[in-house]
């Protein structure tokens, strides 16, 4: 037998792990947190997201994923196109909101107000482009408009690769936005 292995085995047999003796009260393992289910902000019915609060809907193009926000939250829905990587978000804000809302890790480098024709509305809207701090993060284009007693910030989150195709797909989806009230 190899004397080095015998010596190593003897040394390992003599070593024991030393654990400190706990001081004070030892707390029991925590129970897993209870998950509170929150009603979604709306549902998708026949290819359209319908806001549960009423008044807003947007088409969900075929192949896209719709993810409603939490009912009491500001985000009403997020739509994602797996083919282009564009994400469309609809935010319902206080009616007093008159400027584009800040985004973490992104700065509004362009903002304007006017009658832009990207959306199916005919009155003036605020528009802006938010440039991310991370050069690989999506660029955000946004429209802020007043509808149904709320301010709505509609956003396109455009990937850095394939931005033109993603913008075209996102604008087509936003073009289906409707406010009934």
Image: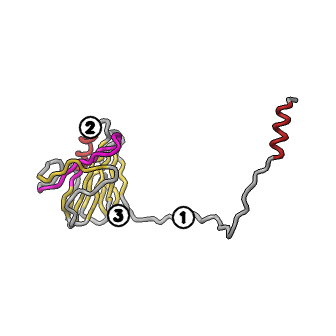
Classify the position of the C terminus by image quarter: bottom left
Q: Is residue 174 above or below residue 30?
A: above
| Nearer-N-terminus badge (1/2) | 1
Find the magenta span and give its range: 123-143
Residue 97 numbered mark, or none: none
| Nearer-N-terminus badge (3/2) | 3
Q: Which residue is mark 2?
A: 165
Residue 92 location (% of width, % of height)? 27, 61
| Nearer-N-terminus badge (3/1) | 1
As rendered, which of 27 and 120 lies closer to the eye? 27
Find numbered disc 2 in the image and state the secondary structure of the residue it sits on: helix
Q: Is residue 104 above or below residue 55?
A: above
Distance, label 3 to label 2, CA atoms, is 30 Å
As rendered, which of 8 and 47 lies closer to the eye? 8
User: Is label 1 in contact with label 2 (beta carbons under 8 Å)?
Assistant: no
Classify the position of the N terminus by image quarter: top right
Q: Which residue is mark 3?
A: 73
Q: Which residue is mark 1?
A: 33
């Amino acid at each position: 037998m190899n004397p080095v292995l015998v010596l190593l085995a003897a040394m390992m047999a003599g070593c024991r792990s030393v654990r400190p003796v706990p001081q004070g009260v030892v707390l029991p393992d925590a129970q897993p947190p209870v998950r509170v289910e929150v009603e979604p902000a709306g549902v998708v019915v026949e290819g359209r997201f319908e806001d549960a609060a009423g008044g807003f809907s947007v088409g969900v193009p075929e192949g896209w994923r719709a993810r409603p926000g939490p009912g009491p939250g500001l985000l009403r829905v997020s739509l994602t196109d797996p083919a282009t990587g564009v994400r469309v978000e609809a935010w319902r804000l206080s009616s007093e909101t008159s400027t584009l809302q800040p985004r973490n890790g992104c700065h509004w480098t362009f903002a304007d107000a006017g009658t832009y024709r990207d959306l199916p509305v005919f009155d003036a809207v605020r528009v802006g482009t938010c440039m991310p701090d991370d050069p690989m993060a999506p660029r955000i284009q946004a429209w802020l408009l007043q509808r149904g007693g709320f301010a709505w910030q509609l956003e396109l989150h455009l990937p850095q690769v394939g931005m033109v195709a993603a913008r075209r797909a996102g604008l087509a989806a936003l073009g289906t936005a409707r406010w009934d009230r």
